[in-house]
Image: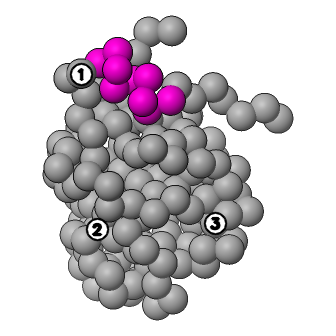
């Protein structure tokens, strides 16, 4: 299976000076360095219940954007969830928090960005969360349905996918 064509973030920024660009706080995880797609948002804190529910559903080429509050005390996405996300057609996951099972994530055909890796798992049922609302982190407002593009140069958000 061929990887979908992902425009370079540098080209997107050159063509769209209005693009929102994330502060360079993310590490590259996952088996794909470059990914793009429409955004789906979650806001959680040290509880990945909603993340699990999301990646077990059809991804349809979307990017799951998870505002984990910037917590560095546990991983919100691990190997099992990366397998579910890849199997169900998610293009990528951006986590304002940590991942775990970094080597397992690297084996999956999905892009993942996160602040860091952490070996501790989250505690399901510990906190509630929200889906589908705008989330703000890394200097960007992420809204459902907007378009995200990521590669080794960074993460860019536009109101819609660029032409071409």
Q: Position of residue 90 (x, y in %)?
A: 56, 44
- Residue under label 2, please give it: 68
Left or right: 65 as drawn, with respect to 61 = left
The circle drawn on residue 137 is: none
Q: Position of residue 21 (x, y in %)?
A: 27, 39
Residue drawn at 40 percent across, 16 percent down: 162
Task: Give the image quarter of residue 123.
Answer: bottom left
Q: Main secondary structure of the magenta part?
A: helix
- Residue under label 1, please give it: 17
Q: Secondary structure at mark 1?
A: loop
**Marks 1 and 3, how far apart in space?**
32 Å
Q: Position of residue 94 (x, y in %)?
A: 41, 54
Q: Magenta segment, which residues?
A: 8-16
Nearer to us in this view, 10 or 95: 10
Label 2 vs label 1, nearer the camera: 1
Quadrant assignment for the N terminus: top right
* Whether label 2 touches label 1, CB < 8 Å: no
> Magenta segment: does it hold 35?
no
Nearer to us in this view, 115 or 136: 115
- Residue under label 3, please give it: 105
């Amino acid at each position: 299976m061929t990887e979908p064509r992902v425009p370079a973030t540098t080209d997107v920024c050159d063509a769209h000076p209005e693009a929102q660009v994330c502060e360079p706080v993310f590490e590259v995880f996952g088996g794909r360095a470059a990914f793009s797609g429409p955004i789906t948002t979650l806001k959680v804190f040290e509880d990945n219940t909603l993340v699990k529910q999301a990646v077990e559903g059809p991804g349809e080429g979307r990017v799951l954007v998870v505002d984990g509050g910037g917590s560095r005390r546990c991983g919100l996405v691990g190997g099992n969830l990366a397998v579910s996300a890849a199997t169900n057609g998610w293009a990528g996951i951006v986590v304002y928090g940590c991942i775990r099972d970094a080597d397992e994530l690297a084996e999956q055909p999905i892009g993942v960005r996160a602040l860091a890796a952490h070996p501790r798992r989250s505690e399901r049922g510990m906190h509630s969360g929200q889906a589908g609302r705008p989330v703000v982190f890394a200097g960007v407002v992420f809204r459902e349905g907007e378009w995200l593009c990521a590669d080794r140069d960074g993460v860019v958000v536009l109101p819609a996918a660029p032409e071409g």
